[in-house]
Image (cartoon, rainbow, N blue to C red):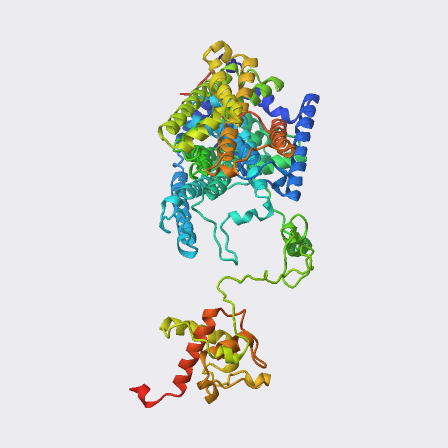
């Protein structure tokens, strides 16, 4: 690529690693203040929920899953883009991933943190969350491993720990570079410990590269399994609209779709504010927009197949609930999901629009909104009219629900902002290995 | 302390220069070589003659172990130790164990790959390596390529190594010194450490104890205990009479109970035992007798239980002639109303149990007064 040709390893280090050495600009502080305020509001409302019980939310029979599980599925989905970029694209040797992989991986972690909070607070009594794990106890009880909810506990906790490990492993050589740049002091001490004294020995690199490749292979299977398991939470049940065999692939595609939208959103802001336009180039953004376009078409296809399956089943309950998706009380959410997920990304067929910053921001935000509403459709509409008409009930979220949703965005962006200032937002080691050199070796 | 050279480090401009230097110096065979690069250089492993990383085999073994562990713990917990039937499936259906099996396999394999590489194969963290204190460390993690010569055997001639490195094109050469051996730990430090450790253990122990003791009693954890509920034998504002326990609604009976019409023994003696003298009934009667009667009347109903000495009362000898000729209905009546020190069993035994008891008592009496006829 032409812009990368002007980069040298030294200038890359100088540009990327120095961000953590400078004083942050006022805009960063402003953004952090805004994000942290939302986060604090969210945490305060979570504390209120813990004290009052989850009656503080709008959930009530039969809509016992609502904002909490919508937000959980939404955030877990956001995380999937990072693993896809760091693992699957690595295996495919898609080199354009190098510039964006670090930030995308970090976003995976932060999104999983946000996601993990929701099932935890939905427990109502999260201080006994350890009941979810198999541990010997005097009651002689074990968790039920035939329940998708337990699969979920294992899938999400494995996903978080493996993503953290993968991210940290990539960071080690970069932290070593930062350590060598740091003046003696506390910062240097912390970086030394975090880098484990990494010294770039050839015999270390040999194991390191192998480990990275193996982890990429493992993470590929993992990322496909995690959202499949999340979809089992629904598909294994008998609720009309949930009990569908298409759910696992449909959820994975949706996860990647929304995840890429979030990556595009964050990266187009990061590259502008941190002046990394020649490292994270329009080419990178365009590649991501192509993935968004492809997954958008997959989503449209999934919606069609889902609708066809429902119609073809000749099951009156399924027919009824699918009518509710578009023409019921909450029908507008179904149309929002279709409009934002299937129609708006079609703008990306034009290469001019794919490379236009305002257009991609618009599409990314639309996709995030659309995917959130898609989960609303799946969860709330399917639940609010169950088999027994006497228990039908309209769901209405409370202010606490909205506040916690806002809080999760606050938490996510607080973490992203801290990451952007404290750690290298570009995987410099990986970039250096692929920079063109005058004396390029064979 | 005198510094001993551990290695001589030469810096090179590019990977290609590094690789050709490795090739030239390896041919001389006097040194063992180690390269330091800011990123993995393709070809460096082969040039240095490094063996293939055993990591893949480690990951395979640990991943398989993870799969086995996950399968066995799920199977043991849900099929053996606490079998739960879900959806009418067999308790040992393995299909439901697959998702967790997969996740645990990945967990084991990934942590072997990551931590096995860092901690076992690369022996990190290592903060005392001579390279970390060298002047070239910054350049080596940025854009320079280092080659360190260490003595393959025998005494180390740093001068010769320096010359050799310059000869193959190193642009800068630096002698890396052996790290100073760690200073011996003073007894006072050791004592302080031990005391600190003991204090930390104590604080953690007490902290855990008090947390576990106090935590459930604090709101909101205690909300589950404090919710409005009825407690028998305790007052309650819920009912008009202020009692938690309420008498039955007049004119109704509890399930499994029948209204009892007799006020006198004479009336009761006319009641017939509604149950047949069957093995099932006798078994039920025996269980009720052993539970409710044997403590006082003795297991053989002879009024001589093990405990009678201890509490003074004189329970009736049910083997005496008065009881041998007593009608089932009167035995039933005594159980309903109680007699002298014996309490009523109207609420603690069911109707069937009381009638079964009468049958079982007959069996006990017959056993203690067996006739020759019975032995035949």
Q: Quadrant of the N terminus of chain B?
A: top right
Q: Quadrant of the C terminus of chain B?
A: bottom left
**Residue B119 as seen in the image, left or right of residue B197:** left
Of residues B270 and A85, the one drawn nearer to the viewer in this rendering: B270
Q: Residue B319, percent across and down?
A: 46, 86
Of residues A143 and A97, the one drawn nearer to the viewer in this rendering: A143
Residue B206 makes an appearance in the image: yes
Residue A60 quadrant: top right
**Residue A55 as seen in the image, left or right of residue A4:** right
**For residue A387, above or below residue A89:** below
Of residues B240 and A407, the one drawn nearer to the viewer in this rendering: B240
**For residue A54, above or below residue A79:** below
**For residue B121, above or below residue B306:** above
Q: Residue B72, percent across and down?
A: 40, 51
Residue A118 quadrant: top right
Q: Residue B28, percent across and down?
A: 41, 32
Residue B160 makes an appearance in the image: no
Q: Residue B290, percent across and down?
A: 47, 76
**Could you tell me which residue is drawn at 44 percent across and 86 percent down?**
B324
What is the number of callouts on the image?
A: 0
Residue at the left extreme, as displayed:
B376
């Amino acid at each position: 690529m032409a812009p990368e040709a002007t980069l040298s390893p030294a200038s890359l280090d100088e540009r990327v690693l120095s961000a953590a050495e400078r004083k942050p600009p006022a805009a960063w502080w402003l953004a952090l203040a805004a994000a942290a305020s939302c986060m604090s509001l969210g945490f305060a409302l979570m504390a209120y929920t813990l004290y009052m019980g989850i009656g503080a939310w709008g959930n009530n029979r039969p809509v016992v899953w609502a904002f909490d599980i919508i937000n959980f599925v939404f955030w877990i989905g956001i995380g999937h883009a990072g693993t896809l970029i760091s693992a699957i694209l690595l295996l495919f040797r898609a080199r354009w991933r190098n510039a964006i992989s670090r930030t995308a991986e970090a976003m995976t972690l932060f999104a999983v943190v946000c996601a993990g909070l929701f099932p935890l607070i939905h427990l109502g009594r999260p201080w006994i969350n350890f009941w979810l794990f198999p541990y010997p106890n005097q009651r002689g009880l074990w968790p039920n491993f035939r329940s998708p909810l337990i699969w979920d506990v294992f899938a999400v906790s494995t996903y978080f720990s493996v993503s953290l490990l993968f991210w940290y492993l990539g960071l080690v050589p970069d932290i070593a570079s930062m350590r060598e740049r740091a003046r003696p002091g506390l910062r240097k001490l912390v970086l030394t410990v975090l880098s484990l004294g990494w010294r770039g020995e050839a015999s270390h690199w040999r194991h390191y590269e192998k480990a990275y490749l193996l982890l990429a292979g493992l993470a590929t299977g993992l990322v496909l399994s995690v959202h499949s398991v999340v979809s089992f939470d629904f598909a294994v049940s008998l609720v009309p609209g949930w009990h569908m065999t298409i759910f696992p692939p449909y959820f994975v595609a949706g996860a990647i779709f929304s995840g890429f939208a979030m990556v595009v959103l964050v990266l187009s802001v990061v590259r502008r504010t941190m002046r990394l336009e020649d490292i994270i180039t329009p080419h990178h953004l365009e590649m991501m927009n192509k993935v968004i376009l492809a997954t958008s078409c997959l989503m449209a296809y999934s919606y069609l197949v889902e609708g066809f399956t429902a119609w073809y089943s000749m099951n009156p309950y399924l027919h009824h609930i699918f009518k509710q998706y578009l023409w019921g009380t909450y029908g507008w959410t179904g149309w929002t999901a279709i409009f934002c997920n299937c129609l708006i990304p079609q703008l990306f067929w034009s290469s001019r629009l794919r490379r236009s910053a305002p257009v991609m921001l618009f599409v990314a935000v639309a996709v995030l909104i659309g995917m959130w509403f898609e989960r609303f459709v799946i969860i709330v509409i399917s639940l609010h009219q169950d088999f027994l008409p006497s228990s039908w009930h309209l769901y209405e979220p409370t202010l606490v629900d909205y506040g916690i949703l806002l809080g999760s965005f606050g938490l996510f962006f607080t973490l992203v902002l801290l990451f952007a200032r404290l750690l290298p937002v570009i995987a410099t080691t990986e970039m250096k290995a692929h920079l063109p050199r005058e004396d390029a070796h064979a | 302390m005198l510094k001993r050279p551990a290695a001589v480090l030469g810096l090179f401009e590019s990977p290609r220069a590094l690789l050709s230097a490795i090739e030239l110096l390896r041919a001389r065979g006097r040194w063992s070589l180690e390269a330091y690069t800011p990123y993995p250089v393709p070809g460096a492993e082969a040039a240095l003659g490094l063996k293939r990383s055993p990591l893949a085999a480690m990951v395979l073994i640990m991943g398989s172990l993870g799969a086995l562990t996950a399968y066995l713990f799920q199977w043991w917990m849900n099929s053996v130790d606490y079998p739960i039937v879900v959806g009418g499936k067999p308790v040992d259906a393995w299909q439901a164990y697959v998702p967790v099996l997969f996740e645990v396999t990945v967990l084991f394999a990934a942590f072997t790959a990551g931590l096995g590489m860092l901690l076992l194969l690369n022996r990190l963290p290592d903060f005392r390596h001579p390279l970390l204190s060298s002047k070239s460390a910054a350049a080596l993690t940025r854009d320079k390529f280092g080659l360190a010569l260490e003595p393959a055997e025998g005494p180390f001639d740093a001068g010769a190594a320096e010359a050799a490195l310059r000869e193959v094109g190193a642009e800068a050469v630096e002698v890396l010194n052996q790290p100073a051996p760690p200073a011996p730990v003073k007894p006072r430090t050791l004592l302080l450490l031990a005391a600190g450790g003991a204090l930390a253990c104590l604080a953690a122990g007490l902290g855990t104890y008090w947390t576990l003791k106090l935590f459930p009693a604090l709101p909101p954890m205690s909300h589950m205990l404090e919710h409005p509920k009825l407690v028998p034998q305790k007052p309650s504002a819920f009912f008009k009479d202020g009692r938690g326990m309420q008498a039955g609604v007049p004119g109704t009976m509890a399930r499994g109970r029948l209204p009892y019409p007799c006020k006198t023994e004479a009336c009761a003696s006319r009641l017939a035992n509604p149950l047949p003298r069957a093995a099932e009934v006798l078994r039920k009667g025996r269980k009720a007798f052993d539970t409710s009667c044997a403590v006082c009347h003795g297991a053989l109903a002879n009024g001589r239980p093990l405990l009678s000495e201890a509490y003074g009362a004189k329970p009736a000898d049910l083997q005496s002639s008065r009881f041998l000729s007593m009608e089932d209905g009167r035995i039933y009546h005594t159980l309903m109303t109680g007699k002298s020190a014996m309490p009523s069993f109207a609420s603690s035994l069911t109707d069937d149990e009381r009638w079964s008891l009468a049958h079982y008592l007959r069996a006990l009496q017959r056993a203690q007064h067996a006739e020759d006829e019975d032995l035949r």
